[in-house]
Amino acid sequence: MDPVTIAAAIATTRTLVKSAKGVKDIAQGLDHLFKAQEEEKTAEKGKPKSRTQQIINIRAKEGDEAFDDETSLGSVAADVLEKEQIDRNLKALQREIDNKWGKGTFEKIKLERSKRIAEKHKKKREQREEAQRRAEEEKSFWKKIALETVKAISVIAFVGGGIYLLMYLKDMQ
């Protein structure tokens, strides 16, 4: 989870909440926020994740190699402090939304979003299963066509061979 992206999404959404007349006015901000929370971004090697990590590494007298080490004091402290800051900002956003549109609105938004995501995944799974079923039916169809073609060729060859044999025997007499 990229703390800068999440913090920016929270700040944007909080600004939108202040001027919004309806929940639809903040939908895009909430969408960016939820996506940022779900995505896990990988940081570049050898570079700090945030300014907080830089400061902690300097004060702890850790070198640049500590930025890559997930167990270094700077990395652990930065992760914990950034998570706490994000949690505080998220709670503030939740309070602002609940104050403006009624208690429990933010939780209803999160619940409805999770339901819609589950429905979306279910539809995708059903579409994949349907496509797989169609592919199997098509494969079966072509197998039947091939089998019937082989049967027809065999019958034609048998009849043709029989006619040839009869003509050969007739010529022999």
Image: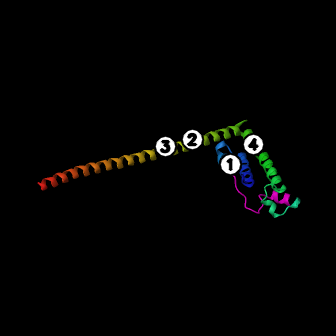
Disc 4 designates what residue?
Answer: 96
**Gap in Å between the C-alphas at discs 4 and 2?**
33 Å
Of residue 95 and residue 18, the one placed in the foreground of this image is 95
**Gap in Å between the C-alphas at discs 4 and 3?**
44 Å
Crowd band around label 2 with a 10 angstrom C-alpha radius: few (<14), some (14–19), many (20+): few
Please state which of the two labelled residues, at mark 3 or mark 2, is closer to the viewer.
Answer: 3
Which range of residues does the magenta coloring cover? 33-57
Residue 7 image point, x, y percent:
75, 52
**Gap in Å between the C-alphas at discs 1 and 4?**
22 Å
Q: Amino acid at mark 1?
A: Glu
Disc 1 designates what residue?
Answer: 38
Residue 81 image point, x, y percent:
82, 51
Residue at the far top in the pictured view: 103
Q: Amino acid at mark 2?
A: Lys
Of residue 109 and residue 16, the one placed in the foreground of this image is 109
**Gap in Å between the C-alphas at discs 3 and 2?**
12 Å
Badge 3 element: helix
Q: Amino acid at mark 4?
A: Glu
Please state which of the two labelled residues, at mark 1 or mark 3, is closer to the viewer.
Answer: 3
Residue 166 image point, x, y percent:
16, 51
Give the residue displayed 85% in from the left and 57% down from the top: 56
Label 3 vs 2, first from the N-terminus: 2
**Gap in Å between the C-alphas at discs 1 and 3?**
28 Å
Viewer can see residue 22: no
Crowd band around label 1 with a 10 angstrom C-alpha radius: few (<14), some (14–19), many (20+): few
Of residue 159 and residue 62, the one placed in the foreground of this image is 159
Disc 2 designates what residue?
Answer: 122
Of residue 28 and residue 138, the one placed in the foreground of this image is 138
Label 2 vs 1, first from the N-terminus: 1
Viewer can see residue 3: yes
